[in-house]
């Protein structure tokens, strides 16, 4: 199932945080995306940063801080388009000239988890998207 995420257009990323192995991305309407899988930020000149770069020196004087790069490049900017790539389940957010991509690289493990007020989406193994909604009583229901 390819979810309709056009409602995310216009949202802005307000915070990015890495805690242990989890990356948390927070948006201005209480939407959030968490992942322990790789993500990539690319721009017109190529790859800007990835979760895999974080903490590596690559011959630089200090290690790459992917969290700070994301804050500089993406935080505060509006999402212009949202795509879930089929059949891989990759979630792609277009932010200005940049693309923030949450990648599914496993046939078995969950990759990204999106939560909002009434909806949860989980990219499960193999790129399949599971949608979980909350009913009027606030109870989770699968769709």
Image (cartoon, helix red, strand yellow):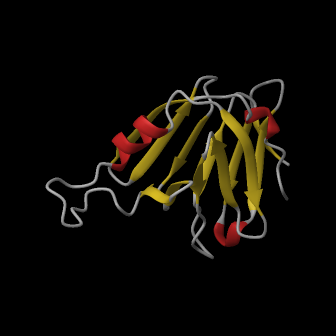
Q: Is residue 121 above or below residue 8?
A: below
- Outermost residue toward the front? 45
Q: Is residue 90 above or below residue 134?
A: below
Relative placement, left or right, of 83 versus 91 is right
Q: Position of residue 18 (x, y in %)?
A: 37, 44
- Outermost residue toward the left? 61
Q: Is residue 58 above or below residue 61?
A: below
Q: Position of residue 2 (x, y in %)?
A: 83, 56
Relative placement, left or right, of 92 versus 13 is right
The residue drawn where x is 35% and y is 61% is 53
35 or 41: nearer the viewer: 41
- Res 95 → quadrant: top right
Pick the quarter of the image with the N terminus. bottom right
Q: Position of residue 6 (x, y in %)?
A: 81, 38
Relative placement, left or right, of 118 versus 124 is right
- Res 57 → quadrant: bottom left
68 or 16: nearer the viewer: 68
Q: Is residue 38 above or below residue 66?
A: below
């Amino acid at each position: 199932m390819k979810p309709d995420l056009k409602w995310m257009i216009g949202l802005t990323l307000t915070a990015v945080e890495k805690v242990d192995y989890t990356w948390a991305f927070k948006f201005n309407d209480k939407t959030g995306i968490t992942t322990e899988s790789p993500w990539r930020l690319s721009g017109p000149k190529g790859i800007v940063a990835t979760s895999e770069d974080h903490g590596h020196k690559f011959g630089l004087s200090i290690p790459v801080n992917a969290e700070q790069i994301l804050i500089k490049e993406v935080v505060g900017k509006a999402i212009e388009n949202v795509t879930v790539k089929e059949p891989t389940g990759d979630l792609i957010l277009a932010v200005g000239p940049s693309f923030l991509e949450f990648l599914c690289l496993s046939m078995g493990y969950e990759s990204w988890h999106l939560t909002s007020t009434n909806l949860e989406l989980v990219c499960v193994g193999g790129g399949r998207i599971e949608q979980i909604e909350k009913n009027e009583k606030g109870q989770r229901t699968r769709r």
